[in-house]
Amino acid sequence: MRIRLIGSELAAVTAAAALASVGHDVTWQPHRDAAWSFLRRADWLRREPQLLAQLERALAEGSLRVSETEPPEVVEVLWLALAPDQRAAAQAAVEAQAACQSEPLVVINNATFPVGETERLAAPLGPDQWAVCLPDRLEEGRAWETFTRPSRWLLGSESAQATVRVRELLRAFNRRRDVFQCMPLRAAELTKLAINGMLATRISYMNEVAGLADTLGVDVELVRQGMGADPRIGYEYLYPGCGFGGPNFSRDLMGLADVQSAQGRASALLEQVLEINEQKKETLFRKLWGHFQGELAGRRVAIWGAAFKPGTARIDHAPVLPLLRALWAQGVEVRLHDPAALPALAAEVGEQPLLTLCPEDPYAACEGADALLLVTEWKCYWNPDWARLAGCLGERLILDGRNIYDPDYVAGQGLTYRGIGRRADP
């Protein structure tokens, strides 16, 4: 099929590469805020497994073309993968495409816009032109895999002809079993937001339980396993931690809260979920403060992990940002290692006399530090050399913001362990 694809989000880049890789003729128009000349150097794109290589292969083979200024040509599919604040660009693209069409057209809204936006995008469309909603469900760090081997597609469509065309468009990624879940437009838009709202609620609830476990001297891991064993609950998204981040998760929660507010409904639950999450981003600082009884000025700490999750170079809404601000406000020197996100962090915080970035070696960040704070659970941090760590850390304190270590084992190595609802002394 002939496809015009618009956007500079991860969803746009992934769709452009994936659709071109299976034989579609794709013209990709990045948004003017992030042109291809900028994107091809973006660290987050280079860090996505397979994606940049697939993109460059499609460009070299000619199945994918980048067009940033050319007027629209007649296509069969207009794919919109824009940021939530780029609704005006989406509307303008639909109007321009509809005006030049001489054959049937399907507009695919792959962006996270407010509920009802797909219907508004459909307003300028004529006969044999339809708008559908295909919510972005990519996972950062696994974007290529989640697009090309999806567990399911949510498809909002109220036209049988449009549904047939979308199924054909994505047939190459729908062979093992039928992964389409079809529903009306607004239902698909709300479902996307509701899914992330539920996942965030589970995380925040588990973080509240972890705080209570800390107070009661209970190991929250035992509580987590007991809860997960109940078939009505399960284990997914029950891991307590020092807060979640990311561009999509946080954005979707705010979007769902905005939908409720626009309908005149109070969103007390979502407000609590967001508030709990922001509080949890300060958890490691509070534990450090408590351990040293507020005497933090002049101390040095090591931080492992800045990205909002493993497998990505992005730090959007990442817990490390409020943690750093709190530490610097107390005069704490920070030495920080991350396998991917240091360029993004440096761009975000600028020159900071109390920050040293350690790109090569995580142990270099620990030299001369009083404590190690683990913020992002990269696999390279899971099995450290404990003897070496004990020799580096003056106070031999481990603050585990993701509960990836065994408290008793760490304590057995002569270190003090404090996790989220877990603790052990040497």
Image (spheres, rainbow, N blue to C red):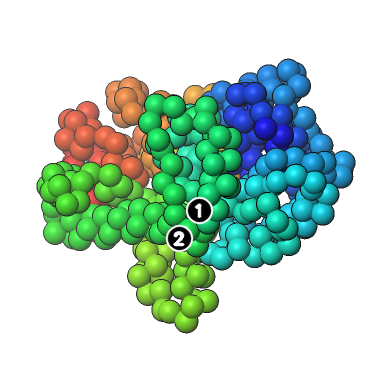
Residue position marked by numbered label 1 in the rendering: 156
Crowding at dot 1, Cα within 10 Å, few <14 / some 14-19 / many 20+, comes out as: many
Q: Amino acid at mark 2?
A: Ala
Which image quarter: residue 87? bottom right
Q: Which mark is residue 187?
A: 2
Which image quarter: residue 65? top right
Residue 425 picture location, percent across and down: 18, 41
Which image quarter: residue 360? top right
Residue 89 seen from this side = no
Give the residue drawn at x 25%, y 40%.
Answer: 416
Is disc 2 in contact with disc 1, using a CB cutoff of under 8 Å? yes
Q: Residue furthest right?
A: 70
Give the residue drawn at x 80%, y 46%.
Answer: 102
Judge from the rendering whether residue 221 lies leftward or rightward of residue 140; answer left or right: left
Q: Quadrant of the N terminus?
A: top right
| Element type at mark 1 | strand
